[in-house]
Image: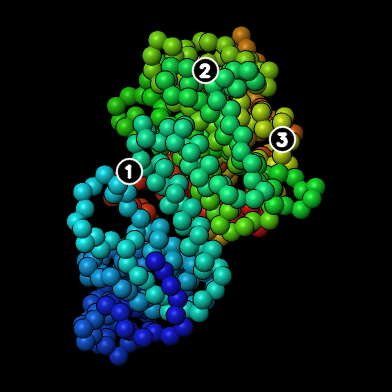
Amino acid sequence: MISFRAKAKHDKQASVVLLTDGQGHPRLKSKLEKGEIFPVAEGRGLLVFVGLGKADKLSLTELRIQVRRAFLCSYLKNIKEVELVPHSTQSGAVEAIIEGILIGTYAWDKYKSKPKDDKSVKNKDIFIVAEHKKPYDATIAVCEGMTLARNLVNDNADTVTSEFLEKTVRGLIKGKKNVAIKVLNKKELRANGLNFHLAVNQASKKEPKLVIVKYSRGKKGEGYTAVIGKGMTFDTGGLNIKPTGSMETMKIDMSGAAAVCGILKNTLALGLKKNILFVLGLAENAIGSMAYKPGDVITGYAGKSVEIGNTDAEGRLVLADAFAYVVKNYKPSRMIDLATLTGACVVALGFDYSGLFSNNNEMAKALLRSAKNTDDRAWRLPIYPEMKDYIKSQIADLKNTSNIKGAGASTAAEFLRQFTGDTDWAHLDIAGSSYVDGAGRMYYGHGATGAGVRLVTDYLLNN
């Protein structure tokens, strides 16, 4: 739990003091180097000094990293109450400190046996020395939305099924005004002709679902923003099966849908005065005698036929049906989708940036501003008119794979664009940014990062 107090009291078991170069303290005889953590006994308590380096070189990203390091250090392991003294309370600093604590110290430990006297960060009482402001509460709320998304991604694929995600969404909106939900199960998907979605799921025993939450708190006549998430609860690759080394983390292929859940939670917590559609396209790309096959031609909700070039290019099929259904039945003024769509995006941008594609320059610029504001990073990649030739089929309207080598993230985005109609649209490919497989990077530890949650929440708040 995080609280705020106007003045430092040093009355807790430990005080964490953040210092930039040039900031001294009576208990320190020399300045700290950047990244140095130095403990000093203070009566029955402990002072933990943290060096941040030169103030004019300190980025908010680096501040988050150093706060994370401090709260994960062994000196605070068994401390229940911590007071944190910021180096500065200027705009953005306290918010970054909050994120360094809540995002940086997140750990997925559901399946670990734990001692009864667990002293992890989530069980600490933390007091930040700063005047209480509403933006700090908003930052905490957004971090909680990220935690929800990260928990959903990190859990077992046979736990976080389409039924589980529907239940999660229903739990979030229960008792809320101006919110309605519609769920298309297998029967409704078939009746409405969402055949791409059905094909991807047809080898699975689990129910496919298209979950749509209509949140109506905007001005009268204001258009809806549709936020759509790819929700492959597990992706084997289908008959084009993924090899060892590529399948082990495929429970994360619903990171887009998990992000939508996090954004929904944030929207409710912040009480956004907007009209928003939250859409989850949920399926499991399994293997079996009923699996859809390379070479199949399938006609989806939009009436366009698609030749299946690869069954592992399944997410774009589910999203295509979701796009077409939402455009026709809800007529949103703009759409944003989040999807772990392509390994090609990882090749292009690595793991710290999501790929951004859009058919509207102003929308793209606004999303990039939100990416910069939140450190939920994105980089714009191109789609252009000639690209539609790369996804043509000789036997159908389109092909779900490209006819050329290279530009895989862009050709996948172009496939999606074919189902947006005249709607302003942006696509966030979070294949690289959504997960850390290893010891950690930046201020994230191992596992899901909640990519897209901060970015899209900020965009909805300010646009």
Residue at the disc numbered 3: 330
Q: Quadrant of the C terminus?
A: bottom right
Residue type for callout 2: Ala
Q: Earlier in the sequence, mark 3 or mark 2?
A: 2
Residue 184 placed where, x, y %?
Answer: 58, 27
Residue at horizontal 65%, vertical 20%? 192
Instruction: Indicate the secondary structure of the residue bearing disc 1.
Output: loop
Residue 406 visible in the shown view = no
Task: Name which quarter of the figure residue 327 lies in.
Answer: top right
Q: CA distance from mark 3 to mark 1?
A: 38 Å
> Number of marks in the image?
3
Residue 171 visible in the shown view = yes
Residue at the disc numbered 2: 199
Q: CA distance from mark 3 to mark 2?
A: 24 Å
Single out the mark in the foreground, 2 or 1: 2
Residue 182 placed where, x, y %?
Answer: 61, 34
The 10 Å Cα crowd at callout 2, few under 14, some 14 to 19, many 20 or more, is many
Task: Name which quarter of the figure residue 286 lies in.
Answer: top left
Residue at the disc numbered 1: 437
What's the mark number on residue 54? none
Residue type for callout 3: Tyr
Residue 421 placed where, x, y %?
Answer: 72, 30
Question: Which residue reaches farthest right?
Answer: 221
